[in-house]
């Protein structure tokens, strides 16, 4: 009996942690400042935190769940648009990039980079760059061919990178300081659920 209940308890714990990750990203998505086609939000901080605390696989699962729930119509993305129409938002590519970003943050954390603030900062800066790999080409596609705007590399960098450098570094530093406390909460959850 114990052997069959332990996997169920572990699965319930994993589901609860993934759901908590979705909730954190959803809340921090609403902390946003629209400065152009791409808002500065608390999402990246949440994505890094979720990935680092839940690990690469659960972190990526949490962000994939976030994406699917938002596309299903729940108002959890930054701004008022939700549902399938969000695919046409210039920022949608960044949301796609959150999934591998959480994985990268988790990968660094699984190698104990998050236990030392300066290593955590380096790892979290690396994870913060990942959404841009997906987001910038997607933004150029939406602003250019889809919306009919003139798009250049300079204009994309001006609206999609430059305004986010300082906030991104600050968010990576905050995550590097917050993660050790968050790890304690996850470990406590694992102990109480028998994980």
Image: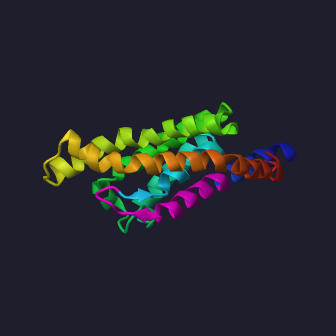
Q: Residue furthest top?
A: 111
Query: Which residue is located at x 62 percent, y 44 percent?
Result: 176
| Any part of residue 50 in sight | no
Stretch of the chain drawn in magenta: 16-38
Query: Which residue is located at x 31 percent, y 54 percent?
Result: 87
The one of 158 and 86 positioned closer to us in this rendering: 158
Q: Position of residue 51 (x, y in %)?
A: 58, 44
Q: Residue furthest front?
A: 166
Q: Residue furthest right?
A: 2
Query: Which residue is located at x 48 percent, y 44 percent?
Result: 99
Query: Which residue is located at x 48 percent, y 55 percent?
Result: 43
Q: Position of residue 12 (x, y in %)?
A: 70, 53
The one of 153 and 103 positioned closer to us in this rendering: 153
Residue 185 covered by magenta stretch? no
Q: Position of residue 47 (x, y in %)?
A: 53, 49
Does residue 109 sit above or below 190 in this rendering?
Answer: above
Tell whether 133 sits left or right of 187.
Answer: left
What type of secondary structure mainly makes up the magenta span? Answer: helix
| Any part of residue 136 in sight | yes
Query: Which of the 4 image quadrants contains residue 156?
Result: top left
Residue 20 covered by magenta stretch? yes
Q: Position of residue 82 (x, y in %)?
A: 38, 64
Query: Which of the 4 image quadrants contains residue 132?
Result: top left
Does residue 103 sit above or below 78 in this rendering?
Answer: above
> What colouring method underlies this structural image?
rainbow
């Amino acid at each position: 009996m114990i052997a069959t209940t332990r996997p169920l308890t572990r699965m319930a714990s994993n589901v609860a942690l993934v759901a908590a990750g979705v909730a954190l990203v959803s809340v921090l998505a609403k902390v946003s400042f629209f400065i152009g086609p791409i808002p500065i939000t608390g999402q990246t901080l949440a994505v890094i935190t979720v990935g680092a605390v839940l690990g690469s696989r659960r972190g990526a699962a949490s962000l994939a769940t976030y994406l699917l729930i938002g596309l299903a119509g729940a108002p959890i993305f930054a701004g008022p648009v939700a549902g399938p129409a969000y695919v046409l938002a210039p920022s949608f590519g960044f949301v796609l990039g959150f999934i591998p970003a959480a994985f990268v943050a988790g990968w660094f954390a699984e190698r104990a980079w998050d236990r030392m603030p300066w290593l955590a900062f380096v790892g979290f800066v690396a994870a913060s760059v990942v959404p841009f790999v997906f987001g910038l080409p997607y933004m150029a596609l939406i602003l250019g061919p889809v919306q009919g705007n003139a798009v250049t590399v300079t204009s994309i960098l001006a609206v999609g990178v430059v305004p986010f450098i300082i906030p991104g570094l600050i968010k990576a530093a905050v995550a590097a300081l917050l993660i050790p406390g968050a790890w304690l909460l996850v470990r406590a959850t694992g102990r109480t659920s028998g994980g």
